[in-house]
Image (cartoon, grey):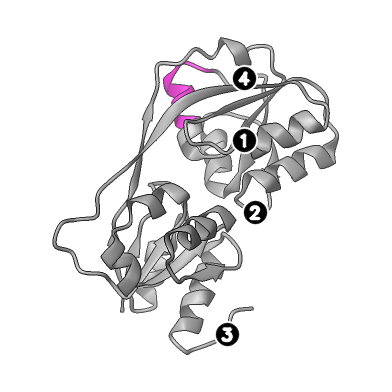
């Protein structure tokens, strides 16, 4: 059985090795790429908190000369938390699920004070900023990177499984592949994008490596997902 992993580098660390240990042939086909923009971070300078929803946002802020020193930080997912920690950041809030909604809930549960800065990509959904503003926070957003789609390799037939982790990846998926492969959707926005294109899919219940493995085992008829 062959599976295509379409997520960008840095997401779902260890997944490829676990899949190969299960006997699957793994194809790395990133369908999105990010590019740092020449943005000014000055709107974030007065923000006590910086919240990051991706590794790409962390990399872009560092490339733009941003300093994490003295900032209180929040992150979506383990990969983003690790990227901030590796850069010397103090991460105080980690979303239990890899979604902006989960980060908003985790942040608001702490009832912190101070302005909130959101370094984000050009395709970031407004849900995080909206939730925080509705809760009374001053939110300042800066687009620090852009997401671009990448083409599916020419002549590559649809594998048995394709893991999709973002609406941008769904956008780049060729029609033929979407109709002939068994698609796995990570996250509600990815699932919604697949539905909009009319593709059948299996929803991974949680955005974690273990949940992906359990879902694939279920598809293979070995076990049922927990």
Rendering quarter of residue 46: top right
Q: Which residues are magenta?
A: 58-66
Residue at image location 46% in from the left, 67% down from the top: 184
Tell me if mark 1 has few (under 14), some (14-19) or many (20+) residues whose alpha carbon lies within 10 angstroms of its own. Answer: few
In this figure, which residue is indicated by the disc labeled 4? 69
**For discs 2 and 1, the disc positioned in front in the rendered view:** 1
**For discs 4 and 3, the disc positioned in front in the rendered view:** 3
Q: Position of residue 107 (x, y in %)?
A: 76, 38
Between discs 4 and 3, the one toward the N terminus? 4
| Vertical relation: 117 (above or below) 76 | above
| Vertical relation: 77 (above or below) 125 | below
Q: Position of residue 5 (x, y in %)?
A: 36, 60
Between discs 1 and 4, the one toward the N terminus? 4
The numbered dot on residue 97 is 2
Secondary structure, mark 2, is loop
In this figure, which residue is indicated by the disc labeled 1? 126
Q: CA distance from mark 4 to mark 3?
A: 45 Å
Q: Nearer the viewer, residue 183 or 179?
A: 179
């Amino acid at each position: 059985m062959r599976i295509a992993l379409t997520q960008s580098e840095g997401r779902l660390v260890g997944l490829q090795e676990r899949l190969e240990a299960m006997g699957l042939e793994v194809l790395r086909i990133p369908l999105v790429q990010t590019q740092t923009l020449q943005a000014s971070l000055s709107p974030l300078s007065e923000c006590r908190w910086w919240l990051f929803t991706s590794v790409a946002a962390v990399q872009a802020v560092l490339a733009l000369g941003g300093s994490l020193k003295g900032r209180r930080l929040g992150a979506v997912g383990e990969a983003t938390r690790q990227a901030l920690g590796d850069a010397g950041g103090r991460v105080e809030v980690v979303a239990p699920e890899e979604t902006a909604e989960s980060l908003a809930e985790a942040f608001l549960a702490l009832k912190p004070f101070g302005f909130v800065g959101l370094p984000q990509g050009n395709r970031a959904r407004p849900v995080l900023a909206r939730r925080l503003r509705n809760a009374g926070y001053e939110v300042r957003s800066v687009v620090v990177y852009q997401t671009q789609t990448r083409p599916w390799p020419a002549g590559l037939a649809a594998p048995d499984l394709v893991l999709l982790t973002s609406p941008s990846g769904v956008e780049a998926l060729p029609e033929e592949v979407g109709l002939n492969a068994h698609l796995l959707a990570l996250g509600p926005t990815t699932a919604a994008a697949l539905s909009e294109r009319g593709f059948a899919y299996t929803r991974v219940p949680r955005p974690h490596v273990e949940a992906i493995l359990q879902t694939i085992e279920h598809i293979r008829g070995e076990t049922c997902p927990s």
